Amino acid sequence: MAEYKLLITGPMGAGKTTAIAAISDAPPIVTDVQNNDLSVAKERTTVGMDFGELTLENGDTLRIYGTPGQERFDFMWEILAKGAIGLIILTDNSKRDPVADLELYLDSFSTLITRTACVIGVGRSETHPTPTIDDLSIAAQAKGVVCPIVPVDARERDHVLMLVDLLLTQLESK
């Protein structure tokens, strides 16, 4: 059976750790510490990476890595992107500027996106309907990225599996 690496990224609090926990076959490995960023109402934050594994229906293993969301840990982004077959970007519509957040991650991971595939999951869109999926799609297209953008709840296994399925479908069509 084959093993593949998948990367999940996005801003702090977007649900990366939660998403990995929702689909991992075993409890994920996390590098969370006490959050010292008072601008974000979050008790803990990832400083290294998150890691989980998912066995696919065909027996292949998907190794899932989550990046830290804070830009000060961006040196980890490039390290974690090496060898990834695709990228899931999680955004949070309750943040101050979700479009700018998305643009940051599209720019930061442009090399990976160009050579693989990308899916964008939009969290908290049910309580914060703007920006719309269309707004985020326009921002992505302006960066040269055309990919699925869907509302998700990172706590819901089925939602996260949908993101994985969308990503794997894109890879199969390449």
Image (spheres, rainbow, N blue to C red):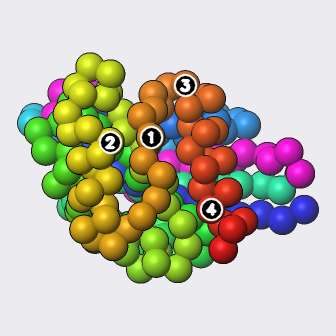
Which quarter of the figure is the N terminus placed in?
bottom right
Q: Which residue is denoted by mark 3 in the rendering? A: 156
At label 2, counting other C-alpha atoms closer than 10 Å, the crowd grade (few under 14, some 14-19, many 20 or more) is some
Q: Which residue is denoted by mark 4 in the rendering? A: 170
Q: Which residue is denoted by mark 2 in the rendering? A: 133
Q: What residue lies at 32% left-to-right and 22% top-to-bottom? A: 126
At label 3, counting other C-alpha atoms closer than 10 Å, the crowd grade (few under 14, some 14-19, many 20 or more) is some
Occupied quadrant, residue 109: bottom left
Labels 1 and 3 touching (C-beta < 8 A) = no
Q: Is residue 159 above or below residue 170?
A: above
Query: Residue 24 at x, y = what percent?
Result: 66, 38
In the image, what residue type sits under mark 3? Glu
Q: Earlier in the sequence, mark 1 or mark 3?
A: 1
Q: Nearer the viewer, mark 1 or mark 3?
A: 1
- Segment colored magenta: 40-58
In the image, what residue type sits under mark 1? Val
Question: What is the number of the mark on residue 150?
Answer: 1
